[in-house]
C-alpha cells in the first residue's frame, strides 16, 4: 500500500472499526500498515473527542450519535490533517483542500448518496474556522 490515499483510507477504516467494535487501534490495523497509517489512526483516535466537538459544532441540526460511524471516521481523519498537517515525521503534508477532496471521494465510494455533501459541508466549515483562527 503505497499511495497516501490508500493509507488514509486504511486509517479511516481502522478508526471506524475501533469505534464499532471497541477493539484497540493496533488490533484493527492491518499488519502491513505503513508508519503514516499507524500515526494517522492513533492521532485521530487520541484526539477523537476534540475532533468530534468540531464535527458537532458544524453539523447543523445533527447530533453526533446520528452521524454514521464511517462518515464520522472519514471526517475525523480529514479534520486531523486540516488541524495538524504534519502527522508523521518526514511526511509531506496534504493541502487542506486535498484532505477535504479525499474525504469526499471516500464518502462517495463507501457511504450513502447524501454523505459526500454532508462531509464536504462540515469539513469546509471547519477549514474556514481553522483559517480564521490562524489569522487571530
Image (tube, rainbow, N blue to C red):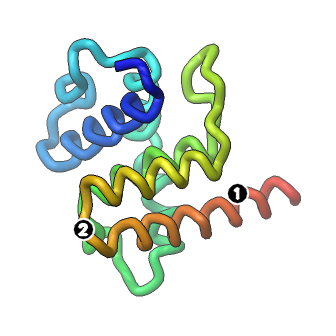
Where is the C terminus found, in terms of image quarters?
A: bottom right
Residue visible at 53% across and 44% down in the picture: 80
Mark 2 to mark 1 CA distance (whole Å): 27 Å
Residue visible at 35% across and 38% down in the picture: 9
Tell me if 6 is positioned left or right of 59 in this view.
left
Residue furthest to the left:
21
Q: Quadrant of residue 91?
A: top right
How many other residues sit within 10 Å of disc 1, few (<14), some (14-19) or many (≥20)?
some
Residue 123 x %, y %: 54, 62
Where is the N terminus found, in terms of image quarters?
A: top left
Residue furthest to the right:
136
Q: Which residue is mark 2?
A: 112
Q: Quadrant of residue 25?
A: top left
Residue 109 x %, y %: 29, 54
How many other residues sit within 10 Å of disc 2, few (<14), some (14-19) or many (≥20)?
few
Tell me if 74 is positioned left or right of 25 in this view.
right
**Which mark is first along the chain, 1 or 2?**
2
In the rendered view, tell whether residue 97 sits above or below residue 12. below
Residue visible at 38% across and 23% down in the picture: 38
Q: Which residue is mark 1?
A: 130
Mark 2 or mark 1, whichever is nearer to me: 2
Tell me if 98 is positioned left or right of 53 in this view.
right
Element type at marker 2?
A: loop
Residue 127 x %, y %: 65, 60
Element type at marker 1?
A: helix
In the rendered view, tell whether residue 11 sits above or below residue 30. below
In the rendered view, tell whether residue 111 sits above or below residue 2. below
Amino acid at each position: 500500500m503505497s499511495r497516501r490515499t490508500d493509507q488514509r483510507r486504511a486509517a479511516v477504516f481502522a478508526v471506524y472499526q475501533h469505534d464499532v467494535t471497541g477493539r484497540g487501534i493496533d488490533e484493527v490495523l492491518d499488519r502491513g500498515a505503513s508508519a503514516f497509517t499507524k500515526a494517522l489512526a492513533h492521532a485521530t483516535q487520541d484526539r477523537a473527542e476534540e475532533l468530534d466537538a468540531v464535527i458537532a459544532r458544524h453539523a447543523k441540526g445533527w447530533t453526533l450519535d446520528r452521524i454514521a460511524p464511517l462518515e464520522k471516521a472519514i471526517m475525523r481523519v480529514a479534520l486531523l490533517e486540516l488541524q495538524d498537517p504534519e502527522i508523521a515525521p518526514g511526511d509531506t503534508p496534504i493541502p487542506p483542500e486535498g484532505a477535504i477532496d479525499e474525504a469526499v471521494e471516500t464518502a462517495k465510494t463507501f457511504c450513502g448518496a447524501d454523505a459526500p455533501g454532508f462531509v464536504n459541508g462540515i469539513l469546509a466549515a471547519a477549514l474556514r474556522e481553522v483559517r480564521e483562527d490562524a489569522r487571530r
